[in-house]
Image (cartoon, grey):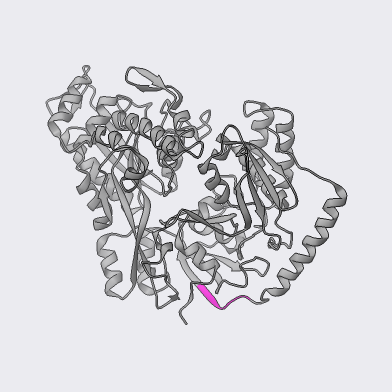
Amino acid sequence: MEFQIMKKLSILLAVFLLVIGAALTSVAAQQDEAPDGVWLGTWPYRLPPDHHLNAYADGGPNTNLGNVYREMVELAPAFYMWADNSYEAILAESWGFSEDGSAYELTLRSDAMWSNGDSINAMDVITTYALGRLVGWTQFDFIDTVEMVDEFTVSFGFIDEPSLLAEQLILREPLVATATYGEFAEQALALFDEGLDRESDEWSDLLVSLREYRPTEYVASGPYTYSISDVGDSFMTLSWHPNSIFSGTVQFGEIKLWAGETDSTTPLVLSGEIAHSTNVYPPTVVESYQQQGIEIVTIPRGYGPAMLFNWNVSPWDIQEVRQAVALVIERDQNAFLTNGLGAMGTVYMAGILDGNIGAMLTDDVIEQLDLYEYDLERAEALMEEAGFSRNNNGIWADADGNTISSEWIFPAEFADFAGASQDAIAQMNEFGFDISARAMPWQEVPDNIRNNTFELSVWSWGAASPFASRHFNNPLQRWVTDLDTATQPGMAIPMEAYPFNGETVNLDEMIRQMNAGVDVDAHVERAGEVALIVNQTMPYIPLNVILSAEPFNTDVIAGLPSMDDPIMLNPTGRDHFIKLSILTGVLGPAS
């Protein structure tokens, strides 16, 4: 792959002068003082030293600001609107496929600046994607060149054909500052120019160096930033700065994020110290919010809890056993104990969220799906087919008398995942499994999954995405091929030689190519092939689908859009309505 930077000194000098002039004009037009309002939110961030500012390493902005708040600091080119499948400009001025379909072109607006006063330009895109390639971003399943066309325009060359998924990945990826990562990007570009790949020592060494890097300043394109000193045990504070294109429109001078999950944030919501939260609260807590006059905003959540198997631990590598598990968990009951009426038992069991099935699969495929309706007799037959029988204590055991005994780990602070786990364990044990539960701090659960130091666990499945491949990604690729499998085996599913109907298929490649191209009918056909594989083999159990019932205190925050506003069709998470609403000043302090 080539990352080409087209440079001509005379042209760049002229462009540089124009950019500086535009930037100064932009800053002059913005206000000099921070707005008075304070946004009161929450996020389960980590504490230093595990909390740092490197966007390319675990424990950085993706962890500590998540997919809701990171774009308050680092902006993406555009924002996606689910209602009409359109994009709202953020950093981008224009975007689209080239006339011959060989590339995707992105032009940034010329007046955007970083918090340090630098212009945001095409070099920042080059930097962002040089390091994205180094760490293995999904974008590079579709693109193989990233070329600077001019000071503000970048061309992404497609490997084969144009891709609608690549378009969304490009437009929704936050850009990072060359001032912060430029040295690493230069080294990465040099590796690519030499033709080295991820198997080389040089690539591995640079990747390690990048992940160990700890920036001392968070250079921001959004109107807020913070330093490690702003991170406290109870809350962290993002502070307004004057250089962003949105500094003059936001109504909050600070974003205050309280630490914690459901239990620790519940009293803060009731006291008004948290005005909005994306945490999952039990039905009784939601009712108490409503009784206090707090608005509950119900929007799609885009995921649900899934039972994850370690395929390196017997008998969870046996298809019939996994199918039996799917049959002995009454999923509607599990949904209620996950999130009350704010969750629904999974119906189609095909790796795609139920609400998206009709758009992503054909009727013929849907009719072929095994719904795994609660059926203890069928489950018993599958267990016996796999060579297991009940011992004198009613526990399933193999021919040598070894019982099916495993530990299920779950995050203690996540009320939804904890509820789903404890109910699933109880139902499995009633059937004759011997499963023990172990709650642990939420941060430790994903580490155990990544490192393959678990037997059974729970985490999310599905995605808030209009593309089927993103649904299948979580958890199949997220906890396997998206990891460095040499050091982090994850769920240990053999994705590149996946067992199916007596043969093996490259399930990883099937998912990666699912949304290649712009032919939606082809996308649906490929999605159907993978859905049938997932449905038959049950590599994990999609227990239920959660709705997001989010407390929103209108006594503290004004401007909540009405539920018939198109932006309210956006799910929580990456496309959450509060992101655009804060940036554009729709949301502000109530007084």
Residue 59 appears in the rendering: yes
Q: Position of residue 516 (x, y in %)?
A: 50, 36
Q: Position of residue 16 (x, y in %)?
A: 81, 57
Residue shown at the point (46%, 41%) measured from the top left:
447
Residue 140 appears left or right of 449: right
Q: Nearer the viewer, residue 207 or 552?
A: 552
Asked if residue 35 lies in the magenta stretch, the reply is yes
Q: Is residue 588 above or below residue 420?
A: below
Residue shown at the point (31%, 49%) measured from the top left:
545
Asked if residue 93 lies in the magenta stretch, the reply is no
For residue 566, what is the image quadrant? Answer: bottom left
For residue 4, what is the image quadrant? Answer: top right
Residue 9 appears left or right of 290: right
Residue 46 appears in the rendering: no
Count of residue discs: 0
Residue 235 appears left or right of 491: right
Residue shown at the point (56%, 70%) measured from the top left:
254
Q: Nearer the viewer, residue 405 or 293?
A: 293
Would you say the magenta stretch is mainly helix, strand or loop? loop
Q: Residue furthest right?
A: 10
Q: Residue furthest bottom?
A: 591
Residue 579 appears left or right of 83: right
Magenta extent? 34-38
Q: Position of residue 165 (x, y in %)?
A: 51, 43
Q: Nearer the viewer, residue 15 or 442?
A: 15
Residue shown at the point (42%, 25%) measured from the top left:
494
Q: Position of residue 357 (x, y in %)?
A: 33, 43
Q: Is residue 353 above or below residue 382?
A: below
